[in-house]
């Protein structure tokens, strides 16, 4: 069972370094995102923007249609592909701005393949239901955002019930609603 704890500024400082003159886009890290949807294209844009601003040297967005168009309009340096197969990345971000209820069988197969891979995966929103039993190292996003507040009280408990067994003893903090809860593994 993976350990769960709060991430600190010191944790980040240990892992992030200022790029030097010998660095290139690959040595600075490649992030792949399979996020956003026609209903929530902004999630794709925000994730891609965050990846670039965090210092990634190469950002790959997996998606089509409205979300992909919005990503390219905002960050044209992003490499966009329709499918993740064959994409070489150092980490994946999946699920933000997606809805498990409207996921196609092909999308589910692709997400499961990412979750069974060897690179770390940040799992959020519409992919949380696929996280149990996966082999990839996972970082599970369990915080509400301002955009989810109207439905947070009804949808968050269901998502958390799926994720909490993966996390063992964990702390869940919702900074927008001012709630904090601890749950011990049964």
Image (spheres, rainbow, N blue to C red):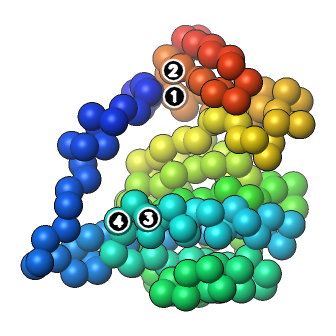
Near-viewer residue (169 or 46) = 46
Q: CA distance from mark 1 to mark 4?
A: 28 Å
- Residue at left 67%, top 46%? 128
Near-viewer residue (133 or 161) = 161
Determine whether the residue tagged by mark 3 lies in a helix, strand or loop.
helix
| Disc assigned to residue 167 | 1
| Disc assigned to residue 53 | 3
Q: Is residue 175 above or below residue 100?
A: above
Q: Is residue 163 left or right of residue 20?
A: right
- The residue mark sitting in front, 3 or 2, is 3
- The residue mark sitting in front, 1 or 3, is 3
Q: Circle 4 sits on which residue?
A: 55
CB within 8 Å, label 1 to label 3: no
Q: CA distance from mark 1 to mark 3?
A: 28 Å
- The residue mark sitting in front, 1 or 2, is 2
Q: Circle 2 sits on which residue?
A: 170
């Amino acid at each position: 069972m993976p350990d769960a704890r709060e991430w600190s500024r010191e944790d980040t400082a240990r892992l992030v370094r200022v790029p030097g003159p010998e660095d290139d886009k690959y040595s600075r890290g490649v992030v792949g995102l399979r996020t956003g949807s026609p209903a929530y294209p902004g999630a794709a844009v925000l994730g891609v923007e965050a990846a670039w601003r965090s210092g990634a040297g190469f950002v790959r967005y997996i998606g089509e249609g409205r979300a992909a168009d919005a990503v390219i309009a905002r960050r044209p340096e992003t490499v966009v592909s329709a499918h993740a197969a064959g994409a070489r990345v150092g980490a994946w971000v999946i699920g933000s701005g997606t809805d498990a209820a409207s996921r196609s069988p092909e999308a589910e197969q692709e997400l499961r393949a990412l979750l069974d891979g060897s690179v770390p995966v940040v799992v959020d929103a519409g992919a949380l239901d696929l996280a149990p039993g996966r082999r990839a190292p996972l970082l599970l996003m369990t915080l509400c955002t301002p955009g989810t507040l109207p439905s947070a009280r009804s949808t968050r408990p269901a998502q958390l019930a799926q994720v909490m067994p993966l996390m063992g003893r964990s702390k869940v903090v919702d900074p927008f609603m001012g709630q904090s809860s601890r749950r011990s593994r049964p």
